[in-house]
């Protein structure tokens, strides 16, 4: 139901006088919020109290809290839990923090959500209005700090605006290009008492009009015809699908479009799951660590249609040489600012991906625009998939991370929710795991925030408790938010943590091997002496095991996955395993390094690469 | 290249921060900035002058347009437009310079709005060229203080560069 189309009948509490804190909680309840992640503190205590009282008054038949309050170890964890919840469900994630350090700890997840277009609402307490700007205890200028990071920020200085602000924040977070909205609420505003309305909103008429226009904007017939004719004429068309397809809920339309026009699909890191990775037309991920066959398809295609993707530097590190043979570049995106940002395109449409693809499919039906026979191209692509498959050192005695993930994939069959940290393990997971649907793959794509995996997995489980939730993590990444191990056991979250432990920052070492003459600055030895199994046990994990022999992997994975409750598996992988293929930063796909275990059609010497200036 | 950009925004706190952030986040300096309400008291008009690569400015303008409190953005650069700035100059006006300053004020059709024994405060309005020329000529007289409003600008024809 669209929040703007509320029933006109009055809210049962309409006209009731409530404290500001209760107004906040009531709006959350009206918005259907069942879980709030957050850490308390002085300036937000009234609202925590309001949640307690709300739960007491509205307890469900089985004595459960209708609005669960999940307390992390650190506010960053709360932010990523809300983000994991939002990514896995498509609903708005909510987190609630106190002023000062509580809110500054949340800057990273807010920026992360902005960069990956994830809808969350963060409510922070602020020092009382009269104390703002006096360097009061636990004061920080959150409005200013978050202004550069969030989709929208409010500081409620007029308590009369509180209810409208909180309700409007939800609409802004989930509509258009989704993103994070921050509401900073001074303590005196939480304590203020006033009438509850039940439907009042801020005046965002212009925004709403613009967004609804984009939401419902079909591709104009003439433009649609031009695109479809181009696809028809093309010999080697390719779709490049990104996170926008997931955000728009356009997976079915994308798949139907690809099938109808017989166009293979490559996806970005954020677009994984936008089309079933096992679909014959899916060539998996493109870009810096994309599959060789996906990148070759990008090299070879003569038409490229980007849908909800933004030619990011991990995809088009060398924009000028990206898709060099594409004579027709087309781009569908809901954000006009993305059109032409990196590549000049021949055709574009600003609007919702689902509506756009739907309208193109309708046009095809109406005008019987039959696809040119792309069979030869499809055969070529299928052949590339066979000739240049993903590979790794299968004969090694050391445990190869790719092997562990293949084994995990056999068990979860592409149906589990998987979150990750950032680094090599993240890329291996993107390369070797299947995702049959969207919203199963949760990863910090744009920001690349280490420490994302564990809290995101916990948040995702609260959103979809019927699902198996796996956190594929690295030892460097998980350490950043290791405190959340306890959150998993405290709340009985049956998250399955698979630690691909290579004793350090593997991706950093890989770059140092490739681009910095094997000078392992800051990573020359094990970064830590932590016994992760003991750490998990310290947090009362009843399943915490270490695997050091390859032969033990399948059995250990099965036991770990079957365990009833949170489970931790520390797999000691080959320290020197690298992520391949790799397109060095700033380079074109022609310079893709495929390593020793993936065949390459254009061998590239690794020593030629000098990428110290690039990132 | 120099760009004169007008931004219509919701008249509420924090908007200026968000608009300025888009420039400062890329290390762009805003050369001049002028903010005041429009015919609609709910809406303020920001006029800013900045320098930068055309493609980057174009990108910033697109990003400005997606900010919630931003109603409309016009890059007037390349369109026929009028641009004016108001400057107050306090200049030395003693026996030695008084006559010459008065003469310059007449030539440039400015106004002396305050006078003391040895200083004038002059109000000058004009486009960037006039202001620069006037200040250059005034310089040898001994400028004590300058307050500039920053440019305000308006597209001349009815043509709307947004369309």
Image (cartoon, coloured by chain):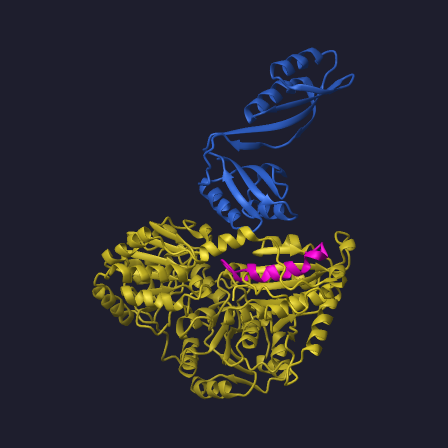
Chain colours: A yellow, B blue
The answer to whether residue A51 is left or right of residue B55 is right
Residue drawn at point x = 45 percent, y = 55 percent: A214
* Residue segment shown in magenta: A156-179
The answer to whether residue B13 is left or right of residue A216 is right
The answer to whether residue A365 is left or right of residue B19 is left
Q: Main structural element of the magenta stretch: helix, strand or loop? A: helix
The foreground one among B103 and A424 is B103
Residue drawn at point x = 68 percent, y = 56 percent: A161
The image quadrant of residue B49 is: top right
The answer to whether residue A180 is left or right of residue A71 is left
Q: In the rendering, at what x and y percent does residue A465 appear?
A: 54, 80
Q: Does the magenta stretch include residue A160?
A: yes
Q: From this view, report whether residue A256 is shown above or below residue A586.
A: below
The image quadrant of residue A379 is: bottom left
Q: In the rendering, at what x and y percent does residue A228 appear?
A: 28, 57
Q: In the rendering, at what x and y percent does residue A77 appear?
A: 61, 69
In this orientation, does residue B96 appear?
yes
In this orientation, does residue A577 appear?
no
Q: In the rendering, at what x and y percent does residue A173 appear?
A: 55, 61
Q: Is residue A340 magenta?
A: no
How many dots with numbers?
Answer: 0
The foreground one among A187 and A234 is A187
């Amino acid at each position: 139901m669209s929040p703007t189309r509320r029933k006109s009948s009055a809210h049962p509490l309409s006209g009731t006088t409530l404290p500001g804190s209760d107004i906040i909680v009531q709006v959350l309840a009206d918005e259907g919020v069942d879980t709030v992640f957050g850490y308390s503190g002085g300036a937000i205590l009234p609202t925590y109290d309001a949640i307690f009282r709300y739960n007491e008054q509205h307890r469900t038949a089985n004595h459960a809290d209708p609005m669960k309050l999940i307390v992390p170890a650190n506010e960053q964890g709360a932010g990523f839990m809300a983000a994991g919840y939002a990514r896995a469900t498509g609903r708005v994630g909510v987190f609630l923090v106190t002023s000062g350090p509580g809110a500054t700890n949340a800057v990273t997840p807010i920026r992360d959500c902005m960069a990956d277009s994830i809808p969350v609402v963060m409510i922070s307490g602020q020092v009382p209005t009269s104390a703002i700007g006096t360097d009061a205890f636990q004061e920080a200028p959150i409005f200013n700090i978050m202004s550069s990071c969030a989709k929208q920020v409010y500081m409620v200085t007029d308590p009369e605006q509180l209810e409208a602000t909180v309700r409007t924040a939800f609409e802004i977070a989930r509509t258009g290009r989704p993103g994070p909205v921050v509401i900073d609420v001074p303590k005196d505003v939480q304590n203020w008492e006033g009438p509850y309305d039940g439907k009042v909103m801020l005046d965002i008429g212009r925004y709403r009009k613009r967004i609804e226009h984009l939401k419902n904007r079909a591709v104009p017939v003439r433009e649609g015809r031009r695109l479809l004719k181009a696809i028809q004429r093309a010999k080697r068309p390719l779709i490049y699908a990104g996170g926008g397809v997931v955000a728009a809920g356009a997976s079915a339309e994308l798949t139907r479009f690809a099938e109808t026009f017989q166009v293979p699909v490559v996806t970005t890191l954020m677009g994984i799951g936008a089309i079933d990775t096992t679909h014959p037309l899916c060539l998996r991920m493109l870009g810096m660590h994309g599959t060789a066959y996906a990148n070759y398809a990008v090299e070879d295609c003569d038409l490229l249609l980007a849908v909800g993707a933004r030619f990011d530097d991990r995809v088009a590190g060398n924009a000028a040489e990206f898709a060099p043979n594409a004579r027709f570049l087309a781009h569908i995106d809901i954000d006009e600012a993305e059109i032409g940002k990196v590549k000049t395109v021949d055709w574009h449409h600003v609007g919702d991906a689902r509506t756009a693809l739907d309208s193109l499919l309708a046009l095809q039906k109406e005008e019987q625009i039959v696809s040119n026979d792309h069979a030869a191209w499809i055969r070529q692509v299928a052949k590339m998939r066979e000739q240049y498959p993903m590979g790794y050192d299968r004969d090694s005695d050391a445990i190869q991370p790719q092997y562990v993930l293949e084994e995990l994939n056999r068990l979860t069959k592409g149906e589990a929710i998987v979150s990750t940290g950032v680094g090599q393990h993240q890329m291996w997971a993107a390369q070797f795991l299947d995702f049959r649907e969207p919203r199963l793959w949760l990863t910090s794509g744009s920001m690349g925030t280490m420490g994302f995996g564990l809290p995101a997995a916990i948040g995702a489980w609260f959103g979809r408790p019927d699902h198996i939730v796996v956190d594929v993590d690295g030892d460097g990444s998980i350490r950043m938010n290791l405190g959340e191990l306890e959150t998993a056991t405290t709340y009985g979250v049956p998250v399955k943590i698979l630690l691909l432990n290579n004793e350090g920052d593997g991706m950093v070492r890989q770059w140092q091997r490739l681009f910095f003459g094997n000078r392992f600055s800051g990573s020359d030895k094990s970064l830590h002496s932590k016994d992760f199994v003991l750490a998990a046990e310290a947090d009362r994990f009843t399943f915490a095991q270490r695997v050091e022999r390859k032969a033990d992997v399948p059995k250990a994975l099965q036991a770990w996955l079957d365990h009833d409750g949170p489970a931790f598996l520390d797999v000691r992988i080959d320290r020197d395993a690298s992520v391949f293929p790799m397109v060095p930063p700033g380079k074109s796909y022609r310079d893709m390094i495929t390593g020793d275990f993936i065949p390459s059609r254009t061998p590239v010497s690794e020593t030629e690469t000098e990428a110290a200036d690039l990132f | 290249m120099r760009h004169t950009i007008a931004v219509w925004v919701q008249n509420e706190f924090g908007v200026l921060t968000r608009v300025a952030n888009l420039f400062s986040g890329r290390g762009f300096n805003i050369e001049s900035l002028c903010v005041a309400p429009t015919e609609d008291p709910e809406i303020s008009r920001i006029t800013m002058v900045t320098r930068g690569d055309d493609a980057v400015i174009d990108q910033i303008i697109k990003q400005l347009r997606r900010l919630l409190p931003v109603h409309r953005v016009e890059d007037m650069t390349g369109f026929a437009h009028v641009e004016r700035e108001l400057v107050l100059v306090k200049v030395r006006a003693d026996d030695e310079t008084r006559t010459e300053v008065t003469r310059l004020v007449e030539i440039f059709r400015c106004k002396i709005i305050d006078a003391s024994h040895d200083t004038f405060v002059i109000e000058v309005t004009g486009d960037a060229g006039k202001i620069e020329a006037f200040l250059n000529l005034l310089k040898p007289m001994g400028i004590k203080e300058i307050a500039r409003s920053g440019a305000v600008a308006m597209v001349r024809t009815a043509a709307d560069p947004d369309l």
